[in-house]
């Protein structure tokens, strides 16, 4: 297949191998796209890596603002933690990167789209479905198509004089401003503690002896201030540093991938964990018990769609409609305590609060007449107590 391929390029092992593969096996011109979603990589360095590999053209697109506004903030509103743990950093960035690829492909008159995903992970699902939703061009995924493994890729890279950083030789890493995923190598032993060298954002040694506090303010479900810092992107960067410095933000769990494989996943996500913990705590204060229970189900479904590559499914927009409506009352301030790797909410306040101290108090000033509870409890438990009584009666008869 000759022609022009647009490739999502990170400068890492997989995508570098793909450039050479497209050029040599397919005799294609390669146009690379690097989308900046806050991975903190020097864009000039990635550009020169691409040029060294002989690409025809390289595009750098700064999509950090869009990533935060259209992907990260909706995920905070949805308290999105896949399997109660993973903040979806990679999962949220993929549809955006694929969207940018489509824009470049149109501009460049590309004849194919390419990515460096393997056939074992979730990223192929996310890329393919977004690309398919916007284009009929063929998708080339050489790592998947050729069933390549990392050892073979490293040997291929060496043969082609592709320079791979030493950390990439040990782990497969994907990062953006919402989180850092570390996979592969020694981490694949599910019982073994990840070595501290795997962590960059979260301090694991010599942690401060004094707790740190952070005050996070939300308006309509959106974080608008953390201590003195304003603006969602700045807040995320600030919390990654502050909570990471207190040892907060490591996740280690067994994850169910879309393709059926279970994997041991390790993440560094200090800001995401703080913001979601604070946001969901505030929701509990301002929402009724019925809203809380129902939203929990919606949140879980939202995280599942985002994780499993179904960002484009109309159901996500439907859920966003509900979630956005529910956020109107989610304004207030939450205080978190960060200490030697632990994080917990130690206070919250809101002008929309449904917490009424006068009714909740055990003190003499209570305005709640306890005598009302007797009838309520009787009716509340009526079916359950009757069912038990009947069961006992019937079992006696047998
Ligand atoms: N398991 C996570 C996900 O599916 C992280 C994937 C990270 N990718 C990587 N190449 N390390 O979203």
Image (cartoon, rainbow, N blue to C red):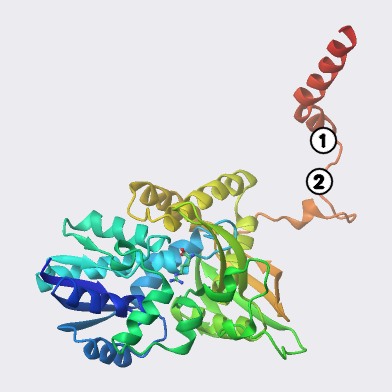
- The secondary structure type at the circle numbered 1 is helix
Residue farthest to the top, as pictured: 397
Residue picked out by circle 1: 372
The relative height of residue 395 versus residue 244 in the rendered view (above or below) is: above
Give how far across and how far down residue 64 sits, in percent. 36, 77
The relative height of residue 9 versus residue 320 in the rendered view (above or below) is: below
Contact (Cβ within 8 Å) of mark 1 with mark 2: yes
Q: Report the front residue among 282 and 270.
A: 270
Residue picked out by circle 2: 368
- Residue 101 bears which disc, if any? none
Q: Residue at x 28, y 74 (%)?
A: 18
Q: CA distance from mark 1 to mark 2?
A: 9 Å
Q: Which quarter of the rendered picture does the N terminus lie within? A: bottom left
Q: Which quarter of the rendered picture does the C terminus lie within? A: top right
Q: Residue at x 58, y 72 (%)?
A: 187
Give how far across and how far down residue 345 sits, in percent. 69, 69
Q: Report the front residue among 317 and 95.
A: 95
Q: Residues within 10 Å of mark 1 (few under 14, many from 20)?
A: few
- The secondary structure type at the circle numbered 2 is loop
Q: Report the front residue among 132 and 20.
A: 20
Give how far across and how far down residue 333 sits, in percent. 61, 70
Q: Indicate left or right for 357 with 9 as reference.
A: right
Q: Cβ of disc 2 within 8 Å of ligand 1?
A: no
Q: Indicate left or right for 118 with 357 as reference.
A: left
Q: Indicate left or right for 138 with 199 as reference.
A: left
Give how far across and how far down residue 389 sits, in percent. 85, 18
- The answer to whether residue 13 is visible is yes
The relative height of residue 309 versus residue 228 in the rendered view (above or below) is: above
- The answer to whether residue 351 is visible is no
Q: Residue at x 24, y 79 (%)?
A: 20
């Amino acid at each position: 297949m000759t022609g022009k391929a647009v490739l999502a390029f990170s400068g890492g092992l997989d995508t570098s191998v793909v450039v050479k593969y497209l050029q040599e096996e397919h005799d294609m011109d390669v146009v690379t796209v690097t989308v900046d979603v806050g991975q903190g990589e020097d864009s000039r360095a990635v550009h020169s890596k691409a040029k060294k590999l002989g690409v025809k053209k390289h595009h750098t697109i700064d999509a950090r603002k869009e990533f935060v506004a259209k992907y990260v903030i909706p995920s905070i509103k949805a308290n999105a933690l896949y399997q109660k743990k993973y903040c979806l950093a990679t999962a949220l960035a993929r549809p955006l990167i694929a969207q940018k690829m489509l824009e470049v492909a149109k501009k460049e008159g590309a004849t194919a789209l390419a990515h460096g995903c393997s056939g074992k992970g979730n990223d192929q699902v996310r890329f393919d479905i977004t690309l398919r939703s916007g284009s009929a061009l063929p998708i080339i995924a050489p790592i998947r198509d050729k069933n390549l493994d990392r050892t073979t890729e490293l040997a291929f890279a060496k043969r082609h004089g592709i320079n791979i950083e030493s950390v990439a030789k040990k782990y497969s890493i994907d990062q953006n401003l919402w989180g850092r995923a570390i996979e592969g190598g020694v981490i694949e032993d599910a019982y073994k503690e990840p070595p501290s060298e795997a962590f960059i954002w979260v301090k694991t040694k010599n942690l401060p002896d004094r707790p740190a506090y952070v005050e996070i303010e939300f308006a309509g479900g959106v974080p608008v201030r953390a201590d003195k810092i304003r603006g969602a992107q700045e807040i995320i960067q600030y919390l990654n540093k502050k909570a990471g410095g207190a040892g907060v933000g490591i996740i280690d769990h067994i994850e169910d991938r879309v393709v059926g494989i279970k994997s041991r996943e390790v993440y560094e996500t200090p800001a995401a964990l703080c913001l979601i913990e604070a946001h969901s705590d505030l929701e509990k204060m301002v929402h009724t018990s019925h809203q809380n229970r129902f939203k929990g189900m919606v949140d879980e479904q939202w995280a599942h769609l985002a994780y499993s590559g179904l960002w484009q499914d109309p159901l996500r927009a439907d859920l966003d409609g509900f979630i956005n409506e529910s956020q109107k009352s989610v304004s207030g301030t939450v205080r978190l305590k960060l200490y030697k790797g632990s994080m917990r909410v130690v206070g919250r306040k809101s002008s929309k609060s449904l917490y009424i101290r006068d009714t909740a108090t055990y003190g003499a000033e209570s305005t709640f007449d306890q005598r009302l509870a007797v009838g309520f409890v009787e009716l509340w438990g009526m079916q359950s107590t009757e069912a038990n009584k009947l069961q006992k009666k019937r079992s006696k008869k047998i």
